[in-house]
């Protein structure tokens, strides 16, 4: 199960059909996830004839070729669990929602189905945690999700741009914060920008669940490989995400412990001339300069009218032991 924390990012490696229909390759991706610390691997499951028309023959053939036999799923789930990796899937056709709900702990709904009520209603009926990507959606379409999903605790939204690849200037990552405030749910990020920069910005904006296409080799022919991260890319992202979260820190209510020398930056009360012992100090005798080591500028009234115990020097800080 997915439990989101403020001090940690939950990473999903979307392999979709990058496995080319090979159970062996799916296991290899699970192994890579386990090795490099990717929390989850996500598949796409569905019936080719319900996903695309046969007129779109190239895509139909690709989906047919990469189908996984449903009998293999329990074995894959068990294998992933052994490797301490969460395995789950997107039902890209409505007939697979029940199967996915039965075999996996999480359902992921792709952006293209954000308005497809047969899948949304089946996911809701499953009572499973449902992650929904918002690519190419309107605010009304996102709002309509919650007419079906009454329990917001069962929904995680993913900000997403449905363009492959997405230019970073088109990533509109401010929507992570906007959707979180608008709907009161966790909002993560599903990445289609080349590289890791958009993921890093998303994390800095509060995304604590990040999905990215994952491959063992970007040079493979299918487009999803080209927009995917390889293990070496993910290592950089994970290291940087930890630094980003540490840099966010906590709200200020006092000086932070790292600012122990803050008094060096503040103004203290100083003597504007040399003065002899016994001088009664006036406001015109005093000025301000860094640091605020003894008496800060707002304590000047503690100095005015006091008699000096000893000789003092120009531009030196005032101290309570200098006067009666």
Image: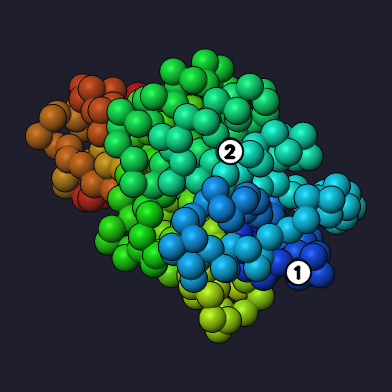
- At x 16% / y 45%, what residue is drawn? 272
Residue 244 screen position, x and y as percent: 51, 53
Residue 89 screen position, x and y as percent: 66, 47
- At x 78% / y 39%, what residue is drawn? 103
Write down the quadrant of residue 299 in the picture: top left
Q: Nearer the viewer, residue 114 or 215?
A: 114
Residue 109 screen position, x and y as percent: 54, 41
Report if residue 83 is visible in the image: yes
Up-down relation of residue 195 to residue 205 (above or below): below
Crowd band around label 2 with a 10 angstrom C-alpha radius: few (<14), some (14–19), many (20+): many
Question: Which of the labelled discs sits on residue 94, or is there none?
Answer: 2
- At x 24% / y 46%, what residue is drawn? 289
In 3D space, how far apart are the residues under numbered discs 2 and 1 (Cα atoms)?
23 Å
Crowd band around label 1 with a 10 angstrom C-alpha radius: few (<14), some (14–19), many (20+): some
Comparing labels 2 and 1, the label whose residue is closer to the camera: 2
Q: Which residue is mark 1?
A: 22
Residue 222 screen position, x and y as percent: 53, 75
**What kind of element bears circle 1?**
loop
Q: Nearer the viewer, residue 93 or 287?
A: 93
């Amino acid at each position: 199960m997915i439990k989101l924390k403020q001090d940690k990012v939950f990473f999903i490696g979307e392999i979709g059909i990058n496995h080319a229909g090979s159970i062996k390759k799916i296991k290899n991706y699970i192994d890579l996830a386990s090795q490099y610390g990717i929390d989850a691997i996500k598949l796409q499951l569905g019936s080719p004839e319900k996903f695309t028309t046969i007129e779109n023959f190239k895509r139909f053939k690709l989906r047919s070729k990469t189908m996984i036999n449903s009998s293999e799923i329990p074995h894959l789930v068990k294998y992933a669990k052994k490797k301490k990796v969460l395995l789950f899937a997107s039902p890209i056709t409505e007939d697979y929602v029940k199967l996915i709900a039965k075999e996996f702990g999480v359902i992921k709904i792709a952006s293209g189905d954000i308005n497809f009520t047969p899948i949304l209603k089946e996911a809701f009926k499953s009572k499973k945690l449902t992650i929904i990507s918002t690519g190419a959606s309107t605010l009304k379409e996102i709002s309509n999700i919650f007419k079906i999903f009454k329990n917001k605790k069962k929904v995680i939204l993913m900000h997403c741009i449905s363009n492959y690849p997405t230019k970073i200037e088109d990533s509109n990552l401010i929507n992570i914060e906007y959707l979180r405030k608008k709907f009161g749910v966790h909002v993560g990020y599903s990445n289609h920008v080349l590289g890791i920069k958009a993921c890093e910005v998303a994390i800095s904006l509060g995304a604590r669940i990040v999905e990215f296409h994952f491959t063992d080799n970007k040079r493979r022919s299918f487009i999803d490989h080209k927009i995917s991260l390889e293990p070496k890319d993910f290592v950089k992202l994970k290291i940087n995400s930890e630094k980003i979260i540490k840099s966010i820190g906590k709200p200020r209510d006092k000086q932070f412990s790292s600012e122990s020398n803050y008094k060096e930056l503040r103004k203290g009360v100083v003597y504007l001339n040399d003065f002899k012992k016994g001088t009664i100090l006036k406001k015109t005798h005093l000025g301000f300069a860094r640091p605020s080591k003894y008496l800060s500028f707002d304590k000047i009234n503690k100095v005015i009218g006091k008699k000096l115990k000893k000789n003092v020097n120009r531009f030196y800080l005032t101290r309570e032991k200098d006067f009666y």
